Image (spheres, helix red, strand yellow):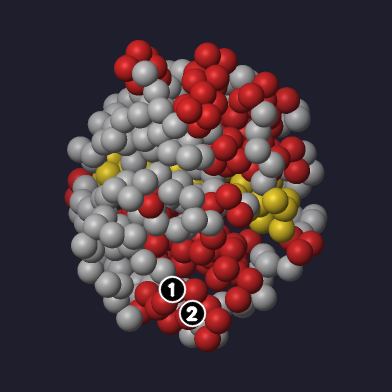
Amino acid sequence: MAEFTEKRSPVFIGSEIYRGSSYGAHHPLRVPRVSTVMDLARSLGWLPPHRFRTSPKAKPAALHLWHDPEYVAALQDAEASGTVSDIVRQRFNLGTVSNPVHPLVYSRPATGAGGVMLAAQLLAEPGAVHVPGGGTHHGLQDRANGFCYLNDVVLGMLVMRRMGLSRIAYVDIDAHHADGVEAGFAGDPAALLISVHEEARWPFTGALTEDGGGNCFNLPVPRGFNDTEMRAVLNGLILPRVAAFRPEVIILQCGADALLEDPLSRLALSNNAHLEVLRALRPLAPRLLVLGGGGYNPWSVGRLWTRIWGVLADESEPDRLPPAGQAVLHALHWGGGGRPPPAPTLLDRLADDPREGPLRPEITARLRQLATR
């Protein structure tokens, strides 16, 4: 198994656009996420200026690399006017409960897309890039889908192809199936797509037997999916498939909604599981792009994505956060909705307690079935 060493300092791509921007008072994405990661990383001294890049806002012409021009124009018009017509709502799935019109309905996703497309350009040379504002894996070519207005993953992969990187492995451990990425690259033999997601949950795609034309490996997992089971999936599916594929670049979508505290799934991972996947994948390609994705508990998502950056930057994680870091977590809130306050362990440290458990027979049976492909 080949191992690679990164040749340059890792890069963090973020933006102040995420600070205070929201999908609306009643939407799960009313909570702060990327700004929390930036603040926590800086409180720890992990984000010096030479490692930080401000995400550009992608221009419409860049988004046309995959997205329908009429849809991109509809997003711009929705931001400018603050509303959409019934025809636009029906045609592009804009102005719905899941995909509302909000003040930055074009600018925020275009910034996320610009960050991932910039990362793709930077990865022309070996290295690692973290874009916590990326990972909008549900966006479709001509409409919004599942809180995702644009698909920055597909756009980034297409830019990588333009940069001469042909073999791309995409690994998604978000709680929800990566349906938009599959729509973009199903059947492409130079792209390997692996999605581990909760069974019987929106978008209700990604069945075990759904292979996308041969290059897609979908593993639906039962509620209560724990660290022990993720380790079995890592060793029984993710690592063998990625190693055999021999990618030039690996993209890891680290959705935080698979964590125990998240309100939009019923999985039970600790953030240690995500880091175990990250560390195991890191040596398998000369280039690594780590994205955010889902995550709707502001404390758990901020802590996870900060830990991810710490691993990429080879920083030493303290057992207990310094006062400045604790202050960042104490200042977070749900933004309404009547949810309970966070457990004390979510306020003074980054690492979760391990959440090991039984390896259930349905997991091992599904892994065996995928191994025969």
Q: Residue at x 32, y 36 (%)?
A: 98
Q: Quadrant of residue 267?
A: bottom left
> Is any atom of residue 194 visible in this view?
no
With respect to residue 290, does 67 lie above or below?
A: above
Q: Are marks 1 and 2 in contact (CB under 8 Å)?
A: yes
Which residue does the numbered mark 2 point to in the structure image? 327
- Label 1 amino acid? Ala
Percent x, y of residue 140: 44, 24
Which residue does the numbered mark 1 point to in the structure image? 331
Q: Nearer the viewer, residue 364 or 27?
A: 27
Percent x, y of residue 303: 46, 67
Q: Nearer the viewer, residue 136 or 123?
A: 136
Q: Residue at x 51, y 64 (%)?
A: 36
Q: Residue at x 43, y 73 (%)?
A: 331
Q: Residue at x 36, y 35 (%)?
A: 100
Q: Nearer the viewer, residue 125 or 104?
A: 104
Q: Is residue 130 left or right of residue 260?
A: right
Please tell me whether mark 1 sits on a helix, a strand or a loop.
loop
Picture disc at residue 93: none
Crowding at mark 2 (Cα within 10 Å: few <14, some 14-19, many 20+): some
With respect to residue 76, does 29 lie above or below?
A: below
Percent x, y of residue 88: 39, 17
Please tell me whether mark 2 sits on a helix, a strand or a loop.
helix
Q: Quadrant of residue 337?
A: bottom left
Q: Is residue 322 left or right of residue 31?
A: right
- Label 2 amino acid? Ala
Q: Quadrant of residue 97?
A: top left
Percent x, y of residue 297: 35, 60
